[in-house]
Image (cartoon, helix red, strand yellow):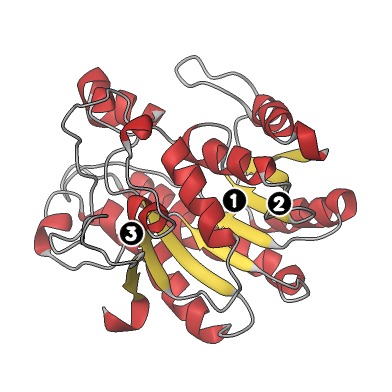
Amino acid sequence: MPRLLGKTVFMSGGSRGIGLAIAQACAREGANVAIAAKTADPHPALPGTVHTAAEEIEAAGAAHGVKSLPLVVDIRDGEAVRKAVDKTIEKLGGVDICVNNASAIQLTNTAATELKRFDLMMSINARGTFAVTQACLPHLLKSKQPHILTLSPPLDFAAHWFRNHTAYSLAKYGMSILSVGWAAEFEGKIGVNCLWPRTTIDTAAVRNLLGGEAMANASRTPEIMGDAAVEILSKPQDFSGWFCLDDLVLASTGVANFDSYAVTPGASLQPDFFVPASAPTPESANGMVGWRAPTL
């Protein structure tokens, strides 16, 4: 039996990369997916639009008759977010899972970060996550097994995660702090967790902004995040308050070999930002999926 059959996912972003991989993985498990993203028309430097994503999601879930709803939305606009959720209810019947995937990045130091870029990161990452979750909340509370999953890191406050890109770190950690609060606020009612990759993931951001082809070749594919997300979203809602690492989630289900997720099998992998130095490996985790929020 598909583990998410009949459920509806509302996702911010998702027209490409990690978000699309999560949406496709959910569709393969029977979930309908609403994609709220800005890319309505093809971008000269980026693959995919909200419309092509919806087609790929429906193809992934074709065996289960999955539907995908493309919604052109700027999540900085709270009213547009609310209307998109209303449209999802109208077309897909509810919201059982909210995935906060949309994010903006600029790895610049304080002097080099323009205020308009600071505002962009804060308004998409932290404020956008709040707006999307708030709009989905009344419908999540009606679901039998609701989840909020946010693509944000464990709250490791080692100074080197802030030294060279304080504004980005603040905006990204804001998403994690919101999740800590929601896990407590909705304890027993909604499963609230964060998911983060141990390694860099081969996305447009990695290729265009971070390390180019060399870093992409030292990365894992987005599918590892999709598979990990499904494992989290398939759990009861009392699984909550975790900062999960992708490979630890999969290792807890018995996965022992991650070579299939490597862009270049056998290559040394590039660790992602914000992964604590003390992070257990899949071999040493003993079933741990990450860190419980209250212990940080």
Q: Is residue 253 left or right of residue 158?
A: right
In this rendering, the answer to whether 192 lies above or below 117 is below
Q: Is residue 82 left or right of residue 115?
A: right
Contact? badges 2 and 3 (CB < 8 Å): no
**Residue 276 in the image, given as x and y percentages of width and height:** 18, 61
**Residue in view at x 58 percent, y 60 percent:** 233
**Residue in view at x 28 percent, y 49 percent:** 198
The residue under label 1 is which amino acid type?
Ile
The residue under label 2 is which amino acid type?
Ala
In primary-sequence order, the first of circles 1 and 2 is: 1
The residue under label 3 is which amino acid type?
Pro
Q: Is residue 203 left or right of residue 69?
A: left
In this rendering, the answer to whether 162 lies above or below 117 is below
| Quadrant assignment for the C terminus | bottom left
Q: Is residue 234 left or right of residue 216?
A: right
Q: CA distance from mark 1 to mark 2?
A: 7 Å
* Few, some or many residues within 10 Å of mark 1 (<14, 14–19, 20+): many
* Few, some or many residues within 10 Å of mark 2 (<14, 14–19, 20+): some
Please tell me in which quadrant of the rendered image residue 78 appears.
Answer: bottom right
Disc 3 versus disc 1: nearer the observer: 3
**Residue in view at x 41 percent, y 52 percent:** 250
Residue indicated by mark 3 = 153
| Viewer-closest of 171 and 287 | 287
In this rendering, the answer to whether 44 lies above or below 76 is above
In primary-sequence order, the first of circles 2 and 3 is: 2
**Residue 221 in the image, given as x and y percentages of width and height:** 39, 32
Residue indicated by mark 1 = 75
Residue indicated by mark 2 = 80
In primary-sequence order, the first of circles 3 and 1 is: 1
**Residue in view at x 29 percent, y 52 percent:** 168
Contact? badges 1 and 2 (CB < 8 Å): yes
